[in-house]
């Protein structure tokens, strides 16, 4: 997937409104660009659901305010904040494994970097299929199994012969990030097919080089976290973030190495 000036410029200012840490800006920029580039592949018919909406930051960046009918999140504080931000027409609390909606309620479900964090992915997909109207679309982004081996420090440990340390580092990072489901394309197809959801589009982003850079920034600024309010640390972080927002437009992704997956599935 290649970055395009038009798409990235349309979201870069919005990203900088909410995200400032270099690793977060890098990940979100590539992630949201992948979403924006592929929205045209979907017939986005109301009613629409943002599954795992959080405070509504991502929905506002991509769709704007009051475009999505319902935002749902399991965390009460996130629901409260989303209501306060007026991003959705309606916000409700709910567990993705047992959603508080009638069957055949939505034409479009959107979920960004959410369902990899839910233990019990089978129930999530089953519920998504249940609440979708026949012919409705489910668009979601998730990290995949390649994230484990694309981490910079995992690769570094392996290259110097410390394979065990590399595996430990990968497990540690994914544990910290609450990644329960890092599935391959084959696994996603099997799971979705079982629940009457047919993949109509699948692509990858955040390749090996980009993942490595994300990992370096994450660790580097974690080291400096105790002095995060230091003038020079803040200055360097701002410079790196500004550079990323400007230069990511020129990046290309080797999709064969993508650590993250974007999937559009249709209920059949």
Image (spheres, helix red, strand yellow):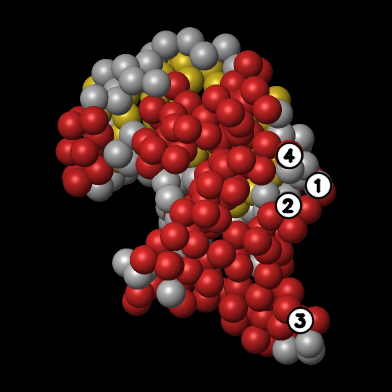
Q: Are marks 1 and 3 in contact (CB under 8 Å)?
A: no
- Provide the residue designation for mark 4: 250
Q: Are marks 1 and 2 in contact (CB under 8 Å)?
A: yes
Disc 4 from disc 2: Cα separation:
14 Å
Q: Is residue 145 visible?
A: no
Disc 4 from disc 1: Cα separation:
13 Å
First in residue order: circle 2 vs circle 3: 3
- Residue nearest the observer in this picture, 105 or 45: 45
Q: Could you tell whether 136 is left or right of 101 in the image?
A: right
Question: Where residue 112 appears, x then y in whole percent?
Answer: 49, 39
Q: Are marks 2 and 3 in contact (CB under 8 Å)?
A: no
Disc 3 from disc 4: Cα separation:
30 Å
Element class at badge 2: loop
The disc label shown at residue 254, or none: 1
Categorize mark 4 by other alpha carbons within 10 Å: few (<14), some (14-19), many (20+): few
Disc 1 from disc 2: Cα separation:
6 Å
- Provide the residue designation for mark 2: 207
The disc label shown at residue 65, or none: none
First in residue order: circle 3 vs circle 4: 3
At 68% from the left and 70% from the top, the residue drawn is: 152
Question: Where residue 66 appears, x then y in whole percent?
Answer: 32, 17
Q: Are marks 4 and 2 in contact (CB under 8 Å)?
A: no
The quadrant in which residue 78 appears is top left
At 62% from the left and 26% from the top, the residue drawn is: 7
The disc label shown at residue 158, or none: 3
Residue 165, above or below 59: below
Q: Could you tell whether 100 is left or right of 9 in the image?
A: left
Residue 125, above or below 266: below
First in residue order: circle 1 vs circle 2: 2
Disc 1 from disc 3: Cα separation:
22 Å
At 66% from the left and 67% from the top, the residue drawn is: 151
Element class at badge 3: helix
């Amino acid at each position: 997937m290649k970055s395009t000036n038009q798409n990235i410029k349309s979201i870069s200012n919005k990203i900088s409104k909410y995200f400032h840490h270099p690793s977060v800006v890098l990940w979100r920029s590539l992630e949201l660009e992948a979403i924006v580039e592929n929205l045209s592949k979907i017939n986005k018919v109301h009613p629409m659901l943002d599954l795992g909406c959080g405070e509504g930051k991502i929905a506002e960046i991509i769709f704007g305010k009051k475009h999505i009918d319902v935002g749902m999140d399991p965390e009460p504080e996130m629901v409260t904040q989303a209501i306060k931000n007026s991003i959705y027409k309606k916000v409700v609390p709910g567990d993705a494994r047992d959603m508080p909606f009638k069957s055949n309620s939505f034409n479009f479900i959107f979920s960004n970097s959410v369902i990899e964090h839910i233990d019990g992915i089978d129930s999530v997909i089953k519920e998504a299929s249940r609440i979708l109207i026949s012919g409705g679309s489910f668009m979601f982004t998730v990290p995949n199994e390649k994230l484990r081996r694309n981490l910079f420090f995992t690769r570094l440990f392996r290259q110097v012969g410390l394979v065990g340390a590399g595996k430990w580092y990968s497990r540690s990072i994914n544990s910290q990030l609450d990644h329960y489901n890092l599935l391959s394309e084959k696994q996603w197809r099997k799971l979705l097919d079982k629940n009457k959801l047919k993949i109509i589009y699948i692509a990858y982003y955040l390749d090996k080089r980009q993942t490595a850079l994300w990992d370096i920034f994450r660790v580097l600024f974690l080291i400096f976290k105790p002095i995060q309010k230091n003038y020079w640390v803040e200055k360097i972080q701002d410079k790196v973030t500004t550079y990323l927002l400007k230069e990511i437009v020129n990046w290309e992704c080797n999709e064969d190495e993508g650590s993250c997956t974007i999937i559009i599935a249709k209920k059949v």
